[in-house]
Image (cartoon, rainbow, N blue to C red):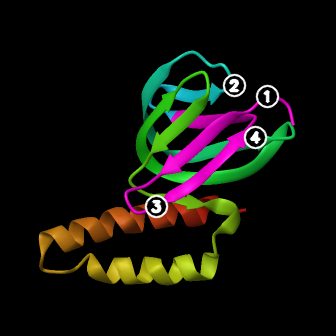
Amino acid sequence: MSDTTNLEIVTPSMVIVSEPVEMVVVPGADGQIGALPRHSKVMSTLHRGVVDIFNDSKISSRVMIDGGIVEINENSVVILAERAEKLDKANKHILEEKLLDFKSQEKDSDPNVSSLAAKNSSFISAVIENID
């Protein structure tokens, strides 16, 4: 493998990815940002979208994120996201079941529950749409 940069994708509940990669392309607020080893320092907000992870000169993995922030420097790319899902490991059937659960919670009388359920429903729908 050629030069690599360390990629970490972190949510409040877990580390989704922590590995050396050749390149990462993230959905930046102002457009796609490609990060290679020895990249200059950059911080950006991120939109909901797919993070493309490259190894062996091709996309080796894809992760759907629900916005967040990214810090890029010479040695690493760190993505902090509220929600993230590995698309290549995602089980469409399980996600569809989760979506139904969240949809039912959207009608909850507690506005906090219904609001969180709506956000989760929206994200899970986007993940399902991006599964290969």
Q: Residues within 10 Å of mark 4 (few under 14, many from 20)?
A: some
Question: Which tag, 4 or 3, sits closer to the chain's start?
Answer: 3
Residue shown at 87% from the left, 40% from the top: 56
Identify the amino acid type marked 4. Answer: Phe
Q: Secondary structure at mark 4?
A: strand
**Dot 4 and dot 3 residues touching (CB under 8 Å):** no
Give the residues drawn in magenta, as a range: 1-27
Residue 37: numbered disc = 2
- Front residue (pair 83, 113): 83
* Residue annotated with mark 4: 54
**Dot 2 and dot 1 residues touching (CB under 8 Å):** yes
Which quadrant is the C terminus positioned in? bottom right
Question: Which tag, 1 or 3, sits closer to the chain's start?
Answer: 1
Identify the amino acid type marked 2. Answer: Pro
Is 16 magenta? The answer is yes
Q: CA distance from mark 2 to mark 1?
A: 6 Å
Q: Secondary structure at mark 1?
A: loop
Residue 3: numbered disc = 1
Extreme residue in the left direction: 110
Q: How many marks?
A: 4
Question: Which tag, 1 or 4, sits closer to the chain's start?
Answer: 1
Residue shown at 67% from the left, 47% from the top: 19
